[in-house]
């Protein structure tokens, strides 16, 4: 879709687009109760995009109160699943009709290439709402097996008020993965987008109400994690908290839940995903291209990024030549250009983190074979070269810690058992991939890998029918698929004596 537009087209649209940085609470745009704002700048060129409401506990209180009132009054909860489906399908239609504006918003706000923002994010978001809406009136409750004198009912009910905290790397998709099942089940939602990319969420909520979502059911409260996010996590009238972001923050949110009302906390946290290439991979050239894409797509700012490339020693030299060739096709550039496949890092702080890890890789003895530098010929933006380290040892920081940038660590292994051991030697367990022509090995290794998603002879497969989530410190619960409804519903047993 993006290829039908030119750099000039997107540059002109970028000059014309406007943003409203006010919160959206109970069906209306609102300044923060304190009157405070924070500036939102584009990582492309540091252009000022908007002043955004710096909401805090007072605004969270208002949003939660609106969500609770809407839930208790039943303006959304009491609609039939078929009625809720129609509203969410209209919402999906509006998302598609406004795809260019939404895609451009995320490109300007966090640096995502416009070809990806339009071709992936702006398509996946309405698809998530449409798929989830279509599913909700096909999820049946249960009748327990009883004697003739009793009737046992097992029913799902909406959990109530859902607090959702989403990250900056896929602002629309991550929001949709929380919002779609939460709203489809009949809950009310208070969404806290990342302060690094809040603007598309503030456009989404207006489209949701245009589609017919009642006021108070969906509220967006921008702000910082230590103010708005903390207040949402500690709020005693929030029934469930869902989060995607770092493992450190996920742990803190679980503490806040314990300090408040024991709200359920569902988290999708960090990752350090292994991508294992065996000597019998069916197509080494394809595997090499996929290895580059797995880490450089979205500037490496992906929780499932294939940041650890494990290569069987017998093919490593030849295979890495192909990987280095594939790396050259990933060139940082202006993300408004449809031909660009790597944009800027989201902000200066994240850029510094990536560059610090590159320095650490050098100091710890890894061999830098591609990239490693900040890009300085693209103006004032936060660009960094796609970077590859070889001769990496599993204990090195760049191989164990999540960088969240375009930095690939390459580790060699000799035996299948070594590959599995190295792959599982991580606090994370979000995703993994393996490349082999041996069917038994594919099943054997996939079963042995401690990860929520395993891809065979591809990287980043799956669709809305596949659950998404992690093992270990990559989180709990699952987004997508029918399993997502579990996070947003209570299961009630009703036993009737006849």
Image (cartoon, helix red, strand yellow):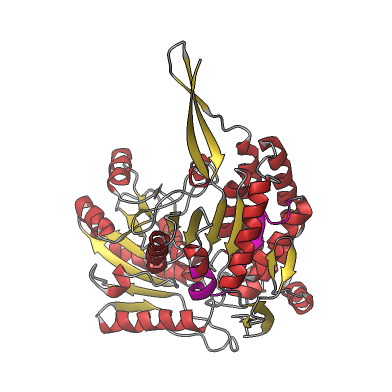
Position of 190 with respect to 420 (left or right) is right
Q: Nearer the viewer, residue 245 or 3?
A: 245
Identify the image quadrant of residue 271.
Answer: bottom left
Measured as percent of width and height from the top left, residue 465 is found at 53, 41
Pick the front one: 5 or 32: 32
Quarter of the figure with the N terminus: bottom right
Q: Residue at x 28, y 42 (%)?
A: 444
As for residue 461 lying within the magenta part, the answer is no
Q: 49 or 164, which is in the foreground?
A: 164
The boundaries of the magenta stretch are: 213-230
Of all residues, the one furthest to the front in this rendering is 497
Question: Is the residue 50 above or below the residue 422 in the image?
Answer: below
Q: Horizontally, is 347 left or right of 424 in the view?
A: right
Where 425 sits versus 143, above or below? below
Q: Is residue 149 visible?
A: yes
Total residue callouts: 0
Q: Where in the figure is residue 8, as x and y percent of width and height?
A: 76, 76
Residue at left offset 31%, top offset 42%: 438
Residue 371 in sight here? no
- Outermost residue toward the top in this view: 148
| Relative image position of residue 280 (x, y in whole percent) | 31, 49
What residue is at 71 percent from the left and 50 percent from the top?
92
Could you say where residue 398 lies in the image, as x and y percent from the top left?
32, 73
Of 120 and 281, the residue lying toward us? 120
As for residue 223 lying within the magenta part, the answer is yes
């Amino acid at each position: 879709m993006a290829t039908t537009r030119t750099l000039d087209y997107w540059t002109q649209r970028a000059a014309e687009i406007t943003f409203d940085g006010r919160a959206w609470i109970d069906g209306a745009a609102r300044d923060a109760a304190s009157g405070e704002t924070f500036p939102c700048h584009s990582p492309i060129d540091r252009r000022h995009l908007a002043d955004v409401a710096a909401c805090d506990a007072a605004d969270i209180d208002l949003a939660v109160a609106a969500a609770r009132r809407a839930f208790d009054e039943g303006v959304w909860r009491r609609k039939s699943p078929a009625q809720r489906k129609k509203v969410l399908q209209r919402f999906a239609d509006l998302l598609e009709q406004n795809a260019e504006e939404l895609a451009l918003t995320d490109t300007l706000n966090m640096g995502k290439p416009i070809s990806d923002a339009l071709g992936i994010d702006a398509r996946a978001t309405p698809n998530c709402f449409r798929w989830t809406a279509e599913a909700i009136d096909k999820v049946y409750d249960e009748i327990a097996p009883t004697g003739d004198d009793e009737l046992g009912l097992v029913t799902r009910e909406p959990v109530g008020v859902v607090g959702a905290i989403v990250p900056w790397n896929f602002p629309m998709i991550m929001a949709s993965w929380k919002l779609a099942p939460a709203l489809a089940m009949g809950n009310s939602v208070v969404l806290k987008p990342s302060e690094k990319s809040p603007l598309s969420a503030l456009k989404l909520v207006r489209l949701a109400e245009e589609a017919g979502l009642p006021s108070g059911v969906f509220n967006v409260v921008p702000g910082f994690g230590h103010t708005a996010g903390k207040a949402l996590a500690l709020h005693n009238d929030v029934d469930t908290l869902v989060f995607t972001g770092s493992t450190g923050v996920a742990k803190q949110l679980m503490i806040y839940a314990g300090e408040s009302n024991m709200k359920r906390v569902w988290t999708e946290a960090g990752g350090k995903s292994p991508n294992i290439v065996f000597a019998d991979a069916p197509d080494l050239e394809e595997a090499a291209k996929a290895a580059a894409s797995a880490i450089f797509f979205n500037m490496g700012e992906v929780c499932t990024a294939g940041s650890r490339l494990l290569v069987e020693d017998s093919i490593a030299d030849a295979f890495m030549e192909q990987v280095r060739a594939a790396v050259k096709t990933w060139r940082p550039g202006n993300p408004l250009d449809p031909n660009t496949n790597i944009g800027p890092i989201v902000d200066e702080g994240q850029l510094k983190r990536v560059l610090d890890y590159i320095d650490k890789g050098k100091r710890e003895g890894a061999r830098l074979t591609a990239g490693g530098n900040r890009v300085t010929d693209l103006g004032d933006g936060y660009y960094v070269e796609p970077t590859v380290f070889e001769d990496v040892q599993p204990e090195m920081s760049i191989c164990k810690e999540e960088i969240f940038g375009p930095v690939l660590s390459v580790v060699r292994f000799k035996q299948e058992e070594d590959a599995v051991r190295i792959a599982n030697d991580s606090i994370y367990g979000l995703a993994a991939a393996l490349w082999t022509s041996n069917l038994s090995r594919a099943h054997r290794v996939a079963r042995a890998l401690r990860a929520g998603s395993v891809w065979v002879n591809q990287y980043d497969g799956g669709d809305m029918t596949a659950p998404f989530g992690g093992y270990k410190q990559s989180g709990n619960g699952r987004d997508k698929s029918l399993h997502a409804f579990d996070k947003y519903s209570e299961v009630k047993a009703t036993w009737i004596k006849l």
